[in-house]
């Protein structure tokens, strides 16, 4: 069960990060290769921050080991 929860959490954080990266590039009006690099970099940074925050909260609440 914990593996399933981990996979869902990774997908959730990755999806939110991807959408945030896309929104950033769209709001800046960028396109092309530069936009893809910026969106991917920002998306990965946001997804990583969400993952760290989510696991920290769940460990503090005692829901994860």
Image (spheres, grey):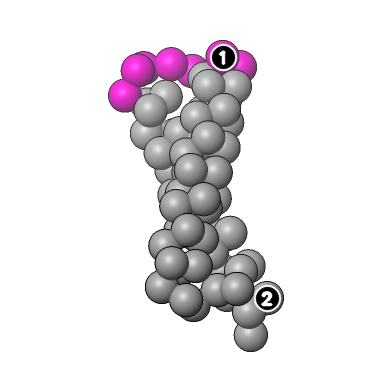
Task: Verify whether residue 28 appears in magenta.
Answer: yes
Q: Which residue is mark 2?
A: 3
In front: 18, or 7? 7
Question: Which badge, 1 or 2, comes first in the chain's sequence?
Answer: 2
Give the residue number, with chain letter if any, for mark 1. Answer: 34
Instruction: Evaluate whether residue 24 shows in this view.
Output: yes
Callout 1: few (<14), some (14-19), or many (20+) C-alpha neighbours within 10 Å? few
Indicate left or right for 28 with 15 as reference: left
How far is mark 1 from mark 2, CA to CA?
A: 36 Å
Residue 6, quarter of picture: bottom right
Q: Which residues are magenta?
A: 27-34
Residue 20 in percent (x, y) is at: 41, 39
User: Residue at point 36% right, 17% down?
Assistant: 29
Residue extending farthest left: 27
Q: Position of residue 21 (x, y in %)?
A: 45, 33
How far from the left and from the top, in percent, is residue 16?
44, 49
Q: Which mark is residue 26?
A: none
């Amino acid at each position: 069960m914990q593996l399933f929860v981990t996979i869902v959490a990774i997908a959730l954080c990755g999806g939110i990060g991807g959408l945030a990266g896309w929104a950033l590039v769209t709001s800046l009006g960028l396109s092309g290769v530069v936009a893809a690099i910026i969106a991917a970099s920002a998306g990965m940074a946001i997804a990583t921050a969400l993952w760290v925050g989510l696991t920290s909260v769940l460990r503090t609440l005692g829901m994860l080991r």
